[in-house]
Amino acid sequence: MKHILTLPIKNEDIEKLHIGDVIYVTGTIATARDEGHARVVEEGVKPSIDLNGGCVFHAGPIMKKNEKDEWVVVSVGPTTSMRMEKTEEDFMEKTGVKLLIGKGGMGDKTALACKKNKVIHTVIPGGCAVLEACMVEKVEGVDWLDLGMPEAFWILKVKEFGPLVVTIDIEGNNLFKDRRTEIGNNKELVLKDVKSKIK
């Protein structure tokens, strides 16, 4: 069965999710990258959208105006989430966000913050930015265009946005860290086997 989260998210909506689970999200999300996070965390500025129970997509979309002078999404692919490692904990606490979407894993600091604040981190496939743009039903607004198009806080209405793979759950389990450990262990076993066969 397709697991769809509808925003805003409550703790009980995500408490049964585990790393590796695949989900989709419906509702109004916001994009935010390094400078958007810094504006919230370091400058104390709040975006116009209430992110309590909400979703932030680590992305720098390409946008354009249509013939009605409305913003539309050309492409919206994920940005490497680790770039936000320094500020993500404070961002969670200042906004009440419950779902993060990005690319690649995040570190121990964010994993501990996810456990503390009951937040999940997910990844969406990279290289599919145009397809992901098709899941945006409407651009509902934009904050902080002074930061530039990729760094602005775009407010997007989405339907069944995904697939999203849970990489950090609310217990602080970290899929990417676990896989790196597993791969490292397997590599040592393979190298040992190969070395035993080489004269």
Image (cartoon, rainbow, N blue to C red):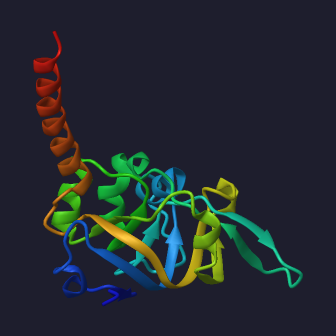
Q: Is residue 191 visible?
A: yes
**For the point 69% across and 55% down, which residue is it?**
148
Task: Provide residue 82's location: percent of width, then percent of height.
Answer: 38, 47
Q: Quadrant of the N terminus?
A: bottom left
Q: Quadrant of residue 55?
A: bottom left
User: In the displayed structure, does residue 127 sit left or right of residue 179?
Assistant: right
User: In the displayed structure, does residue 62 sit left or right of residue 40?
Assistant: right
Q: Is residue 155 above or below residue 152?
A: below
Task: Provide residue 88's location: percent of width, then percent of height.
Answer: 35, 56
Residue placed furthest toward the top: 199
Task: Provide residue 181's location: percent of width, then percent of height.
Answer: 16, 42
Q: Is residue 85 above or below residue 191?
A: below
**For the point 86% across and 85% down, which residue is it?**
68
**For the point 40% across and 81% down, which residue is it?**
24
107 or 142: which is nearer to us? 107
User: In the displayed structure, does residue 112 sit left or right of residue 121?
Assistant: left
Q: Quadrant of residue 15?
A: bottom left
Q: Quadrant of the C terminus?
A: top left
Task: Provide residue 32's location: percent of width, then percent of height.
Answer: 51, 62
Q: Is residue 76 visible?
A: no
**For the point 69% across and 59% down, which residue is it?**
149
